[in-house]
Image (cartoon, coloured by chain):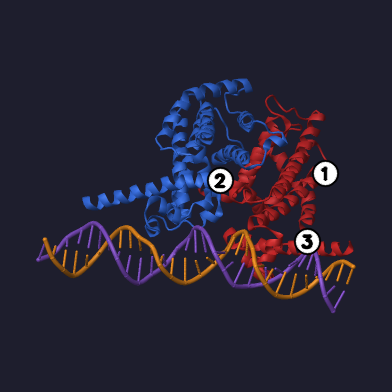
Chain colours: A blue, B red, C purple, D orange
DNA sequence: GACTTTTGTGACGGAGCGTCAAAAAATGAC
DNA sequence: GTCATTTTTTGACGCTCCGTCACAAAAGTC
């Protein structure tokens, strides 16, 4: 039994090593550059050994995405634990999203890969479930803030929306803007100079539009965000630091 | 000169044929299934001939995406030509987006490919410019509605936002929701049963939040949308019909 | 009809995927 | 410590696809 555990630990160690080697290849040189032969060569193992850990390279990508989503989840957990009104705590989640995109940009990029059908379709049910769970967890964390707002009488989710559908709007807004920012060739040339500020303004308007108390002006919102960030970012950084970073 | 034109027409005809053959392969079987050998075989030409038209398969994908974006643009053009207040015309653009995603779903999917860096990076400057132009055109069309609202005194774009950044919010919201809907494993299991209705509600709230006149209740919004769709969808359909469809 | 230019062809070198029979290492019974 | 058995590792192999290029065929020109 002890024997078995030692072996299993060794296997896990090597699995982690495969991911550690694969990550910079994927991030710096793209999916096409990530080949099983190359990973094997770099680790000084035969290709077959790598295949004992991952049945294909798509599975490696998904495994990396799981790590990224877990980091996101940890940031969210910290964010919703912030003190303050429900609305301020929702802003903290926004701050977490901004932090994740800006300061964990590698993870943000890796997380994107799950939206690629080519990859998704070749991966195991098992790991797909892991992803879904993580996504569900994140959703639940944000939903809990909405629920708190509702039960505190600070927010009423109006007519056709359920609470998760309310969250979906914020999710779509933030996520959509980040995708467009990353992938849309030259937003600046069509007049969008600061997408982050723009989306903050839209979030403010969205939450004010739903009359989530306390209502805020743009200036109030900005200064609240400022002080939130001063409190949270050091903690976000230490959460991020628990992961080893990728060399360039 | 006549000779040259006949030849060029022939070349263009074949280019179109390559796209016609490639589209269903890409859509039904994915990017990996789209190989130059296969396209060549299916067209009964040698591979080299296909390479005379497209330097790689990524370029084929981008060419397909250009077609898709042009369809979107045509729908937008029709939408903003709708009669009514600036706000209603903006809703018409929303209806066009919904139509595009739902009834031109192949094009919607094809359009996504441009967000894939693996593909984008292997394509020619030239075609990338085409895409950017088309994206800029769409943006400009929507911006013109905003501009009309402003000059009619029905809308004020508030403090930190420029008009394009205002549009960016709607774009991110609608686009983000559609991406999530398409790619997020089982939204229903996290409580989002009707993402289309949800996003409509968010758009309503967003536009009301910016006090775009006339303000609307959910019921008014829905019935306005209903009548807009009754007027527009037949026209959208005929715009769509100008393109040949893809067999399943 | 002969010569030039354009266009089409498909064999080829190179690379990556995933497999599998054989080699090597680990295990444990005696 | 030995040896049979089980587990793990290995890398050559078959396959597919990419993109090229020397050559062949067709079209155009005079």
Report whether mark 2 lies on the same chain as mark 1.
Answer: yes
Q: Nearer the viewer, mark 2 or mark 1?
A: 1
Give the CA separation, mark 1 to mark 3: 32 Å
Q: Which mark is residue B192?
A: 2
Q: Earlier in the sequence, mark 1 or mark 3?
A: 3
Circle 1/circle 3 CB separation < 8 Å: no
Q: Circle 1 sits in a helix, a strand or a loop, which is it?
A: loop
- Rounded to the nearest angstrom, the CA distance separating label 2 from label 3 is 45 Å
Task: Quadrant for the C terminus of chain B, please.
Answer: bottom right
Instruction: Please give the name of the residue rendered at 41% of the width and 54% of the height, measured from the top-left corner.
Output: A40
Residue at mark 3: B12
Say which of B149 and B248 sits in front: B248
Residue B184: tell me if it is visible.
no
Q: Measuring 80% from the left and 47% from the top, which residue is drawn there?
A: B78
Please indicate, yes or no, whether residue B161 appears anywhere in the rendered image: yes
Helix, strand or loop at label 2? It is: loop
First of labels 2, 3 by sequence position? 3
Kind of element beneath mark 3: helix
Give the side of residue B33 with respect to residue A77, left or right. right
Which residue is identified by label 1?
Answer: B81
B222 to B158, vertically: above or below: below
Q: Residues within 10 Å of mark 1 (few under 14, many from 20)?
A: few
Question: Disc 2: which chain?
Answer: B
Q: Residues within 10 Å of mark 3 (few under 14, many from 20)?
A: few
């Amino acid at each position: 039994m002890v024997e078995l555990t030692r072996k299993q630990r060794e296997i896990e160690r090597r699995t982690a090593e495969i991911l550690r080697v694969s990550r910079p290849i994927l991030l710096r040189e793209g999916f096409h550059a990530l080949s099983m032969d190359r990973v094997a060569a770099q680790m000084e193992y035969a290709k077959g050994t790598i295949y004992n850990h991952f049945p294909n390279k798509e599975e490696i990508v998904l495994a990396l995405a799981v790590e990224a989503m877990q980091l996101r989840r940890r940031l969210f957990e910290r964010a919703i634990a912030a003190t303050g009104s429900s609305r301020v705590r929702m802003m903290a989640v926004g701050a977490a999203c901004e932090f994740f995109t800006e300061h964990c940009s590698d993870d943000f990029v890796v997380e994107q890969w799950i939206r690629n059908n080519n990859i998704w379709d070749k991966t195991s049910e098992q790991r797909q479930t892991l992803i879904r769970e993580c996504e569900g967890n994140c959703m639940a964390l944000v939903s809990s803030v909405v629920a708190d707002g509702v039960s505190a009488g600070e927010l009423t989710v109006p007519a056709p929306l359920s609470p998760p559908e309310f969250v979906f709007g914020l999710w779509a807004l933030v996520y959509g803007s980040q995708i467009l920012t990353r992938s849309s060739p030259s937003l600046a040339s069509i007049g969008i100079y600061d997408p982050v500020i723009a989306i903050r303004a839209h979030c403010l308007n969205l939450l004010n539009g739903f009359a989530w108390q306390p209502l805020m002006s743009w200036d109030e919102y900005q200064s609240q965000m400022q002080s939130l960030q001063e409190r949270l970012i050091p903690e976000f950084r230490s959460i991020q630091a628990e992961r080893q970073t990728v060399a360039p």
